[in-house]
Structures are given as structure tokens and as C-alpha cells.
Amino acid sequence: MHPNTDPQIYWTLLNHEDWNMYIAATSSGLCYIGSQSKSFDELAKWVESRFPGTVLARNDEILQPYKAELIEYLQGKLTCFTISVDFRGTPFQLAVWNALCQIPYGQTRSYSDIAGHIRKPAAVRAVGAAIGANPLLITVPCHRVIGKNGALTGYRGGLEMKTRLLTLEKESSVFEGSILHA
């Protein structure tokens, strides 16, 4: 983790239909997406632990491009994000998070698949811990990781949020496929 060079982290509340989550960005890109319907305290605690001494400043304008893409995703219209991100972690965490970004929209992988992808097949538990530390729910799609037996497993946003995201992607993929094959 490198030291924070930003004096502020900008935040806003994303409200779309029944989705409500706090999002935050540095001057370099989106750095945090909160859990569905959690309080501002979740964001404040994360910033305090990852960016000590940083000021949190509400700025709806700076976060508008990030909100716009997230809303398009939640509407089933966007399958690939183009927004800049600023995720900071250990080299191992970054390798895991980059592997998550390679899971295609509407598909899932197991923790063992991710461990194999980063060439650390024995590190399944460490992969799980890195996934649990992912600060960018949705855009770094940790919701696409399931247990080896196909069971839904832990998710920082809660299993209800994980289920909703997987259902959204499955339904959007089926709809998109039916248009392409019509």
C-alpha cells in the first residue's frame, strides 16, 4: 500500500431505484463502493483505516461519471466499466483484484479458479481474504466468485446483494443473447 497523496477523498450517495450505496473517489479514480443500504459509517471507517488523516468531502459533481456508469450497470445496460479506478493494496491483493476483473460478465469462478489464475494454487484462503478486502464492489466483481460446489459464499455487501448482482447479470446476459440471436 502506498501512502495517500490526496488531501481528500470525495464521496456521494448513489441512489437508484432501491439501490443505495456510498461511493468514493480520489483524484485518480473510484476507490470505494459501499455495501447496499449500509450507513456512512462503513465508508468513514474504511477511509480511516486505509487513508488515515484524509478528509472526506461530499462532492456529487466529481462522482457523477462514476454514478452514471454504476447506474447503467444496475439497469443491465453496461457489462464493462470504463471509469478510472484507484485501488490500493498489497501486490497479492492487486493480483487477485485484477484476476476478478477478468471474469466475464454473467459468469462465475471459484476461489480455486482465482488462485490458479494468479499461479498460487495453494493460496485459496489467502485469495478469499484478498477478495474480502476488495474496496470496489461491483466494478471489481468479487460477486462473481462462488464456492467450488457452486454455493454462494461470503460477500462484504451481504449475500442478498451478491444474489441480486448475479441475477441482474444472468438476466441481462440472457436478454442480450436473445437480441443477438433473433
Image: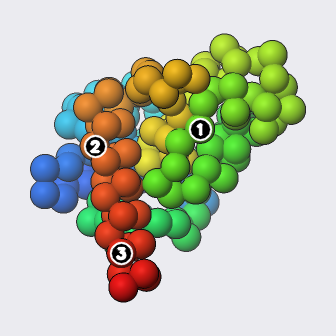
Kindly identify which numbered label has been placed on residue 178: 3
Looking at marks 3 and 2 on the same chain, the residue that comes earlier in the sequence is marked by 2
Q: Position of residue 171 (x, y in %)?
A: 31, 58
Query: Residue at 31% across / 48% down in the picture?
Result: 167
Q: Disc 3, disc 2: CB below 8 Å?
A: no
Where's residue 29, x and y in %?
Answer: 55, 59
* Mark 2 vs mark 1, CA separation in Å: 17 Å
**Residue under numbered circle 1:** 109
Task: Verify CB contact (< 8 Å) between mark 3 and mark 1.
Answer: no
Q: Residue at x 44, y 23 (%)?
A: 151
The residue furthest left is 17
**Is residue 136 visible in this depiction of the protein?**
no
Q: In this view, does 119 lie above or below 154?
A: below
> On the rendered structure, is 5 left or right of 18?
right
Q: Name the residue under label 2.
A: 164
Judge whether residue 140 can be spotted in this image.
yes
Residue 85: horizontal and vertical position, in percent?
58, 56
Vertical position of residue 81 compared to residue 85: above or below: below
Q: Residue at x 66, y 53 (%)?
A: 102
Quadrant in which the N terminus appears: top right
Choose top left, top right, bottom left or bottom right for residue 113. Answer: top right
Please tell me how crowded label 3 is: few (under 14), some (14-19), or many (20+) other residues with Cα within 10 Å: few
Eyeballing the image, is 118 above or below 104?
A: above
SS class, disc 3: helix
Amino acid found under the numbered disc labelled 2: Arg
Q: How far apart are labels 3 and 1 at the CA level?
A: 24 Å
